[in-house]
Amino acid sequence: MWDILHEKLFSIAEANRSCQSSVIHGDAKNGDVEVTRQAGGTQKADDVEFQDVQSIMSHHMGKEKTTREEEPESHVIDMSSSDESNTELQDEAVEEIETMFKKTMNEAATETEEVPLAFESFLHRNGTLYSCFNQHGKRVYVDESNGLVPFPNEWYVEGRFINGTNEVPNQTIAPSSSQHTNAEPAFAEDDRSSAAFIQGKGMVMTYMFEEKANVCRYFDAQSGLWLLLPLQWEMNIEFVRTRIQQIMGALPGLGDQKEITAALRQCNYDPDEVISTYLTIFGDVLFQPAQGEQNYRELNSFRSHLEKDKVIEDLKEKLLNKEKEAENLFQRNSYLARESQYLSEVIQHLNHKVAELEADQQEAREKIRALLTRRSTVPPVKPEPKPSVDPGRLQEVSSLTRGLNVSNKQLRSTVWQWMEDLQNQMKQLVEAVQRMSQAEQDSGRVVEELRTLYRKEAVERKALYNRLLELQGNIRVFCRCRASPTSTTCLEVTSDEEVAVSQKGTKRKFLFDKVYSSSASQEKVFEGTLPIIASCVDGYNICILAYGQTGSGKTYTMMGPKDKPGVNIRSIRELLRICKERENITYALKISMLEIYNESINDLLTKNSTNPLEIRTQGKSVTVPGLTDVEVKTEEDILNVMELGEKNRKIASTKMNIESSRSHLILTLRVEGTDTVSGVTSHGTLTLCDLAGSERISKTEAKGPRLLEAASINKSLTALGQVFSALKCNALHVPFRNSKLTHLLQPCLSGDAKACVFVNVSPDAKNMAETLSTLQFGSSIRQVVLGKATQHVTPAQNAKSEK
Ligand SMILES: Nc1ncnc2c1ncn2[C@@H]1O[C@H](COP(=O)(O)OP(=O)(O)OP(=O)(O)O)[C@@H](O)[C@H]1O
């Protein structure tokens, strides 16, 4: 029977040789297999079965080599070549062959000419694979429940046709039968679809899905799922095989296709990546053809290398961890070593101690032993009777103790009481301190308020005082009459403020702020200037002038003899007194002394006054650069300075052969006061001026130096008169600069300045003309004063009637 079967099989095989190729299609419904002939139409399924049978038979009967050599190249996958035979498989194969043989034999008898049926596989995008074929010119597909169903036109865009070698683009498929009879496969370039024979499953359709990574799956008709194709079968499908060949072409040193397939899987089926990876792992040796299996085996597999790399990395990491552990252990070990060292030292020390203790113990034992020995030899000592206590003494001590306890309690109670008192006193003290602190703060506030009030009051006081002086007149004019050595006088002091001159039987009266008779003392004369001295300390410019003819008593009034000091000394003394009186103000005094002779200024406090000084005006300030300023603190200092000035004046006048009375003497005391409370600084000046004689020179004297000095005196005194006239009429321009005298006196005669003018007159009848001139000058100055006092003052005549 086997011989007949062989003959049949080989006859069928002969018939199949004419076929160039065949494609196997899987039927999704029943798993049957059909072969489509590539060259000449379709062959019936029994042919394919015979082919498989032949293949299987050849395999089982050791005729594979002969059969495969004679077969044309086919896409039918012969899994038998990759599996090893075993008895069970052989039995199964025999049974299968017998079944197929019987079926073949039965159907062979009824074989007739049939229209060939070409199945197509349509893969819908929902994952369902349909088997389609052409029936009467129309495409139908096999539905499990409804049988044959016309292929819907909309499905052409919802899926794709696939065959054994290629994926079929939908747009190239027309639902006409003519396409399926085309000799050339329309989709031959697709290599994702394929078929494979799997032991126990038979021929299965495969498709290389393009997912995140390429995965080769086969369609399991039983479960209806696409399952992963095992490696040993995957290497035979077209998609993989072409890449394997590409890789082996590039790297002839590679020989294991399964290994290359695994590498392709690893590299997402990118042959270039596989090649580069192999070269990375094995190097240029792969460019050489493989020298047999042994040579290749020497090369580790791709996967194992990849795994080895990972293993190496893991080992490196483990090594690192182990090194860390070793380091930790080393540290731990060193720590333990130190600990051990320390403990051994402790043990040593303890041993030493134990030895000492043992020695002590031994010594003690020996002592005890010795004592025991002595005890046994020494007779027992009778206990001495306790001394008897005197009951009276005991009672006395007891009572003393009780007394002491009572005293102790009392003492404690007293101490506690004292402590409580002390605490109360401390509390009271703290409260008192707090009250004091509060009071101090309050007093600080009060002091600050008082300071503020003081400042305010000081300012108001100054303002009021200034206002008072203004009301009295900023320029006050006093008339002082010199005592007459002769009996013939032309002057009559009619009152304290009026003086009359008898001339040819008539009396000319002149009013002044004060008229001092010849009997008026220096002290009395000075009293009139007292109010303005205080103004100087408050920061005002004060000026005291003595005007009159030569010998009228100007120098006597201003300077005076030593025993009867005049206004200069007294005013300075008063100034110092006020300064001393004002405790909250510190004063700095500077004094300068000059004379104006022939309109030139000479410094009297320096011996080297060769060059005359000039006047400089800056705003309201008038200074004499280069003029000596001497700081003085006491009256003595001032007197010394004045003495020096007088001395220098005499020397200078002697040198120039002139009378000292022919020059104006100006003594200036600058007072700078700083209020330590308010912080205000005041600058006042006291100018004491002893003018040159105002008499007119005679015609006979009107020549030479006498004429020059007379002209200069006249000029300066006339300028002084002009200044007063301008002030009298409130002229916009006051001609201060018409003479050196008026220029220097400008600060004392303008603004808030205050001035006292002593008009010194001689009562002698022979000086009547000069006396009248002087009185008229003084009287006119007073008018000026009254004029400055605005509406509160009246002219001289009216002023008398007012009184
Ligand atoms: N009131 C007076 N009581 C007593 N003696 C006076 C009085 N006034 C002036 N004399 C005396 O008169 C003389 C001249 O006075 P004084 O020198 O003061 O005048 P003078 O105006 O300063 O003159 P000169 O312009 O020359 O300086 C002096 O001897 C002085 O002692």
Image (cartoon, helix red, strand yellow):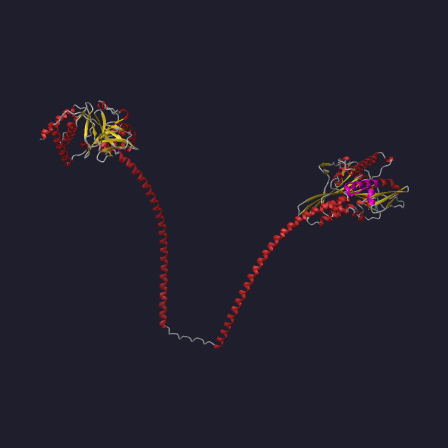
Viewport quadrant of the N terminus: top left
Q: At which x and y percent is residue 113?
A: 15, 24
Q: Which residues are magenta?
A: 775-801
The quarter holding residue 756 reads top right
Q: At which x and y percent is residue 686?
A: 75, 43
Q: Which of 166/106 is in front?
A: 106
The reply to whether the magenta stretch includes residue 336 is no
Residue lying farthest to the right in this orientation: 505
Residue 639's place in the image compared with 430, above or below, is: above
Residue 717's place in the image compared with 69, above or below, is: below
Q: Which of 304/710 is in front?
A: 304
Q: Quadrant holding ligand 1?
A: top right
Q: At which x and y percent is residue 760?
A: 83, 43
The quarter holding residue 223 reads top left
Q: Is residue 240 visible?
A: no
Residue 260's place in the image compared with 181, above or below, is: below
The quarter holding residue 738 reads top right
Q: Is residue 662 visible?
A: yes
